[in-house]
Image (cartoon, grey):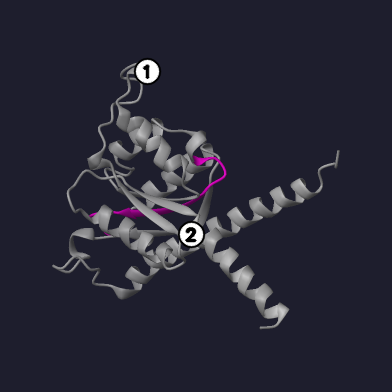
């Protein structure tokens, strides 16, 4: 095998390792067991996994959280710190919510209030929402975009709103509209690709700084 082929193989292996080291989480902002929000977040993560990134669904049903400010931080249950760790370790984030009376769910807002820029700053974020009405979750998505900006994250322009969610799924849990299914997967792919690129850029900058250090 010629040296150029060896070099390409080494680069491919390095890129694969870089990709596998990228973590993405999807936060389900609904407490409904097996609900529509969980399904759409899972679809977005499924799209992301096609790029080889490590994905995790964070279902807030599984976390014992308190209301932000209800007790002193030292008295927060362990699940608050677990949530912070899991989101903090991720490079890409999907936020999913049902729309209630024109805004995001209280459980997701409270979870975000329990976190902050330490978990979100500089990270790539994608947004998905579901709603029972014809207009979809547009208001919730706009609100989450504002929250993401205040958390100093990079919220991608693509977003997915599932309207008339009560009629959107087949009995087996799949979306009736294949185009909508693909949009959710594509959103996950965009977050994954940008997270991978961001990670590589940071590594390249580190190597440039390292190589530029003075020799003693």
- On residue 60, which mark appears? none
Mark 2 or mark 1, which has the lower sequence index?
A: 2
Query: What secondary structure is marked by label 2?
Result: helix
Q: Is residue 130 magenta?
A: yes
Q: Position of residue 36 (x, y in %)?
A: 23, 56
Looking at the image, residue 75 sits to the left or right of residue 202; the answer is left
Q: Which residues are magenta?
A: 120-134
Nearest the viewer among 99 and 13 is 13
Single out the mark in the foreground, 2 or 1: 2
> Which residue does the numbered mark 1 point to in the structure image?
74
Identify the image quadrant of the N terminus.
bottom right
Tell me which residue sits at (31%, 28%) in the image: 78
Q: Position of residue 165 (x, y in %)?
A: 23, 59
Nearest the viewer among 27 and 96 is 27
Q: Is residue 13 magenta?
A: no
- On residue 20, which mark appears? 2
Q: CA distance from mark 2 to mark 1?
A: 34 Å
Residue density around tag 2, few if under 14, some if 14–19, many if 20 or more, within 10 Å: some
Q: Are marks 2 and 1 in contact (CB under 8 Å)?
A: no
Query: What secondary structure is marked by label 1?
Result: helix
The quadrant holding residue 180 is bottom left
Looking at the image, residue 32 sits to the left or right of residue 37; the answer is left
């Amino acid at each position: 095998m010629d040296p150029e082929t060896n070099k390409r193989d080494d680069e491919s292996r390095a890129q694969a390792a870089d990709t596998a080291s990228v973590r993405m989480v999807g936060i389900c902002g609904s407490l409904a067991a097996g609900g529509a929000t969980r399904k759409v977040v899972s679809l977005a993560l499924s799209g992301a996994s096609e790029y080889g990134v490590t994905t995790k669904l964070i279902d807030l049903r599984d976390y014992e959280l308190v209301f932000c400010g209800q007790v002193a931080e030292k008295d927060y249950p362990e699940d608050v710190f677990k949530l912070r760790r899991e989101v903090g370790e991720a490079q890409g984030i999907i936020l999913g919510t049902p729309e209630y009376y024109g805004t995001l769910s209280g459980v997701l807002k409270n979870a975000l209030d329990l976190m902050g820029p330490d978990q979100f700053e500089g990270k790539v974020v994608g947004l998905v929402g579901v709603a029972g009405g014809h207009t979809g979750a547009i208001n919730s998505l706009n609100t989450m975009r504002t929250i993401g900006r205040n958390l100093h994250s990079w919220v991608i322009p693509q977003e997915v709103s599932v309207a008339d969610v009560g009629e959107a799924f087949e009995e087996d849990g799949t979306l009736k509209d294949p185009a909508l299914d693909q949009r959710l997967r594509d959103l996950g792919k965009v977050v994954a690709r940008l997270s991978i690129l961001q990670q590589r850029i940071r590594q390249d900058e580190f190597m440039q700084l390292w190589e530029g250090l003075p020799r003693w």
